[in-house]
Amino acid sequence: MVPEQESPGEFQSFLDAHPELDVERTHRFYDMDTFNRCEQSGDLLLTLDAWSGVHPSLTTVPVRWDLRVPYGLLYAKRPDDRVRGFIAVVKRMLRRRPFNMNGDELLIYEYF
């Protein structure tokens, strides 16, 4: 199962190269319902290390694929003062020296 959205180009290329894989789409963001459904159906779930150990009946097996996933910050369009201050600090830091992880820039999104 992968999130129901346009797959990143590298992952889509991987899927195109392996037509024997039957990919089921999930909703855009993982939540506990996603993991419960995976456990009940017996399906495999492609996920990030951050979700390791989130469900007592699931096991995370690391893979070494040359695929990257964009990361970012999500926050409300009307954040409280603490969040607004944190975002201001991050933006100042990015103007001075863009944050970079393996060639990917940190993305900041407003949500809601």
Image (tube, grey):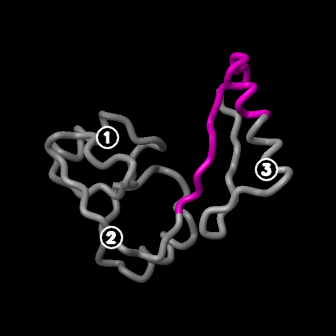
Q: On the image, numbered disc 1 is attached to which residue?
A: 34
User: How far from the left and from the top, in percent, is residue 66?
Assistant: 47, 76
Residue shown at the point (36%, 80%) measured from the top left: 18
Tag nearer the camera, 3 or 2: 3
Mark 3, residues whose alpha carbon is within 10 Å: few (<14), some, or many (≥20)? some
The number of numbered badges drawn on the structure is 3
- Please provide the residue range marked out in magenta: 69-88
Amino acid type, label 2: Val
Quarter placement of the C terminus: top right
Q: Which residue is mark 3?
A: 94
Kind of residue at badge 1: Thr
| Coordinates of residue 45 in the picture (x, y in percent) | 29, 55
1 or 2: mark nearer the eye:
2
Query: What amino acid is labelled 3 in the image?
Result: Leu
User: Which circle's residue, 1 or 2, is located before the other in the chain?
Assistant: 1
Label 2, on which residue? 63
Q: Image check: 101 left or right of 31?
A: right
